[in-house]
Image (tube, rainbow, N blue to C red):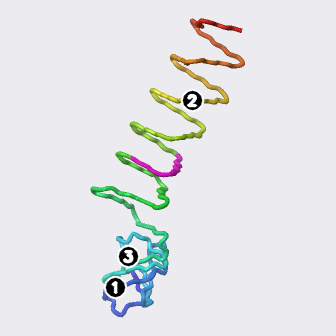
Amino acid sequence: MNVVALRPAPVASEPVHLLGRVTAVAPDGQVGVEDESGAAWSCRRAASCLLQPQPGDTVMISGPDRLRVWLIAVVEQADASVSRIDAPGDVVLASATGSVSIEGAADVRLRATGALDMQAAQWKLQADRAQCRVDEMHYTGQQADATVGHARFFGKVFETVADRVMQMARNAFRIVDDTEQVRVGQMDVEAEQSVRIHARHTLVTGTDLVKVDASQIHMG
C-alpha cells in the first residue's frame, strides 16, 4: 500500500483518475496532492513519470482504487523555466539503431560526484567556450591531433617522455631563469646565417678533440 487518502472517498473500490495540484514533496518520495474537489491525497510517482513534480504543479493521479493511486504525469508546471528529470536508480539513455543527442539553447553541463567515463569510437566536441577541471587525468590513445590559434600551459612541472620529439616554428623564444642542462649522445646545430654564444664566462672543452674551422678566425 503506497497511498493514504486523507479524505476518504465514498466508495473505496472505485477507480481513481483525476487532476490535482501538488501541495508538498516529502524527502521520502511521497507527494501531497489536492484534487479539484479539495480532497487531499498522498501518493508516489509512477515509474514512468520521470519529471520531478514541484509544489504548484498540476498533476494527474490514477489507480484501481483509492488505496492504490500513483502520480502518473505532470500535466502543467507551475514554473516551466526549470525541469528536473529524476529517477531513484541508475539511468541509461540508449538507442538501439540510432544516435542520442543532448541539446541546450544555452549551456550544457555534465556533473558527477564520482568518475566521468566517456567511451566512443570517435569523439567530437564543438563549443564556443569550454572549461575543464580535473584533479587527476590519465589519457591513453594511439594518436592525438590538435589545431589551435593560441595555446598556453601553466604548471609547476612539465615532463615529456617520447622516442621522437619534432618541433617546427617560424620563430622560437625561450627564457630560463636558472639552469638549463642538455644531455645528448650527439648534437648537431646548423644555422643558415649566424650563431652567437655570449656569456660572462664561456667554456668549450672536449675530451679528445676541439676543432675550430673557418675561412677567417678572429680571437680577442
The residue to which callout 1 is attached is: 16
Measure how far apart labels 2 and 1 are at the Cα level. Answer: 78 Å
**Res. 197 visible in picture:** yes
Image x and y of residue 152, in percent: 57, 40
Asked which secondary structure carries label 1, the reply is: strand
Frontmost of labels 3 and 2 is 2
Specify whether 43 is left or right of 150. Answer: left
Label 2 neighbourhood size at 10 Å, few (<14), some (14-19), many (20+)?
Answer: few
Residue 133 drawn in magenta:
yes
The part of the image, by quadrant, that contains residue 173 is top right
Q: Between disc 3 and disc 1, whose residue precedes? A: 1
Magenta range is 123-135
* Amino acid of disc 2: Asn
Of tags 3 and 1, the one toward the viewer is 3
* Residue in the image at 35% along x and 45% along y: 121
Q: CA distance from mark 3 to mark 2?
A: 64 Å
In terms of sequence position, does the residue under pointer 3 or pointer 2 come before the other?
A: 3
Say if the magenta span includes residue 146: no
Q: Which mark is residue 73?
A: 3
Look at the picture and state if 84 lies above or below 39: above
62 or 214, which is in the foreground?
Answer: 214
Q: Check disc 2 and report the residue beneath it.
A: 171
Say what amino acid the circle numbered 1 marks.
Val
Q: Who's the residue at 71% across and 9% down the image?
A: 220
Q: Secondary structure at mark 2?
A: loop
Residue 190 appears at what percent x and percent y? 54, 17
Which residue lies most toward the bottom here? 10
At horizontal 46% and vertical 69% (from top left) the residue drawn is: 83
